[in-house]
């Protein structure tokens, strides 16, 4: 059950990024699926920041917006490509999603709730979770005006902590709307999304260095279970975990940009 739930969330989130990336794929010359994923990821973060922290929209309204927008983009892409392109995308990302999700989810299956609740750094875990819950319940304008429900004052200085790496907590707050799931399990799934994205970013990075696909794939999967990534996963450094795939992708694109400049200069 845990594996199925995690797979659903992982595919859903990554497909949202793909759909967003497809909007500007031609104008920005996004040739690969991985470029579309990470451009869509970046766009998703930027727009959520603007909607919630600048325009003071409620999380529920933002979720309705994304649901309508992604549905429209999906229909437009089907009309544009005249084929079931979604199946091809699912197949391409499955080689990362399936092994990482299954192996990571086997651990909480065997160790139950104790593994994903009281694991690593529970101080940071409860901090992120409390702030995410607050973002889900009230607008940022209410927070700025001090209109917090009394329930949230159990967490000392939460009105100040909301300004510490807020976009990560906000991203998590969107997933809290899966009401049928245990909130601590949602955090575990949330972390797993970025492990998968890190694996994809490493693969994309290695391919650009002309490393063959098989070797790049093996190294990308190994990275998913490497000491450093598991360490970040374990200590609940969610902001750090979220930034890794974007950082690797930016470095990869800078390498491409440098190569393009050298060709022009020659």
Image (cartoon, grey):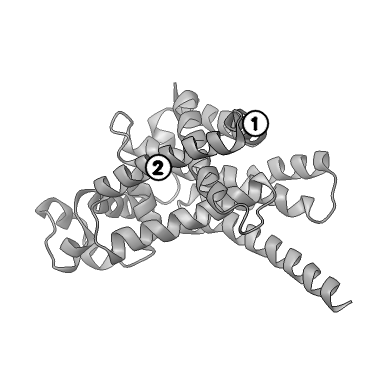
Is residue 62 among the parts visible in the rendering?
yes
The residue tagged with tag 1: helix, strand or loop?
helix
The residue tagged with tag 2: helix, strand or loop?
helix
Sooner in the amino-acid sequence: mark 2 or mark 1: 1
Which quadrant holds residue 248?
Answer: bottom right
User: In this orientation, which residue lies closer to the viewer: 160 or 207?
Assistant: 207
Classify 10 Å Cα crowding around label 1: few (below 14), some (14-19), many (20 and above).
few
Nearer the camera: disc 2 or disc 1: 1
User: In this orientation, which residue lies closer to the viewer: 75 or 48?
Assistant: 75
Is residue 188 among the parts visible in the rendering?
no
Image quarter hosting the N terminus: top left
Residue in view at x 78 percent, y 74 percent: 261
- Give the percent coordinates (x, y) of residue 69: 39, 44
- Give the percent coordinates (x, y) of residue 206: 77, 52
- Residue lying at the far top in this picture: please name it: 1
- Decide: is 94 above or below 141: above
User: In this orientation, which residue lies closer to the viewer: 101 or 44?
Assistant: 44
Q: Say whether residue 149 is left or right of residue 49.
A: left
Which quadrant holds residue 162?
Answer: bottom left
Q: Say whether residue 156 is left or right of residue 240.
A: left
Residue in view at x 63 percent, y 63 percent: 250
How many marks do you count on the picture? 2
- Give the percent coordinates (x, y) of residue 263: 85, 71
User: In this orientation, which residue lies closer to the viewer: 148 or 184?
Assistant: 148
Q: Say whether residue 117 is left or right of residue 18.
A: left
Image quarter hosting the C terminus: bottom right
Mark 1, residue position: 88
Residue in view at x 39 percent, y 35 percent: 185
């Amino acid at each position: 059950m845990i594996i199925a739930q995690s797979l659903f969330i992982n595919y859903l989130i990554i497909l949202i990024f793909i759909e967003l990336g497809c909007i500007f794929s031609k104008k920005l010359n996004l040739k690969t699926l991985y470029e579309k994923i990470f451009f869509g990821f970046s766009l998703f973060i930027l727009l959520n920041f603007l909607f919630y922290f600048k325009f003071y929209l409620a999380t529920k309204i933002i979720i309705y917006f994304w649901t309508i927008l992604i549905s429209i983009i999906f229909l437009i892409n089907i009309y544009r490509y005249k084929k079931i392109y979604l199946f091809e995308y699912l197949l391409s990302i499955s080689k990362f999603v399936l092994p990482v999700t299954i192996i990571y989810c086997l651990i909480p299956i065997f160790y139950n709730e104790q593994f994903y609740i009281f694991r690593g750094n529970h101080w940071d875990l409860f901090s992120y979770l409390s702030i995410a819950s607050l973002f889900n319940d009230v607008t940022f304008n209410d927070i700025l005006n001090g209109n917090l429900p009394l329930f949230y004052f159990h967490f000392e200085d939460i009105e100040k902590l909301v300004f510490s790496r807020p976009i990560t907590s906000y991203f998590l707050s969107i997933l809290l709307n899966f009401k049928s799931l245990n909130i601590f399990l949602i955090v575990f799934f949330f972390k797993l999304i970025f492990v998968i994205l890190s694996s994809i970013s490493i693969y994309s990075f290695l391919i650009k260095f002309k490393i063959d696909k098989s070797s790049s794939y093996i190294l990308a999967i190994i990275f998913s279970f490497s000491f450093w990534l598991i360490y970040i996963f374990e200590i609940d450094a969610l902001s750090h975990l979220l930034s890794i795939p974007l950082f690797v992708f930016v470095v990869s694109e800078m390498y491409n940009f440098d190569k393009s400049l050298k060709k022009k200069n020659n």
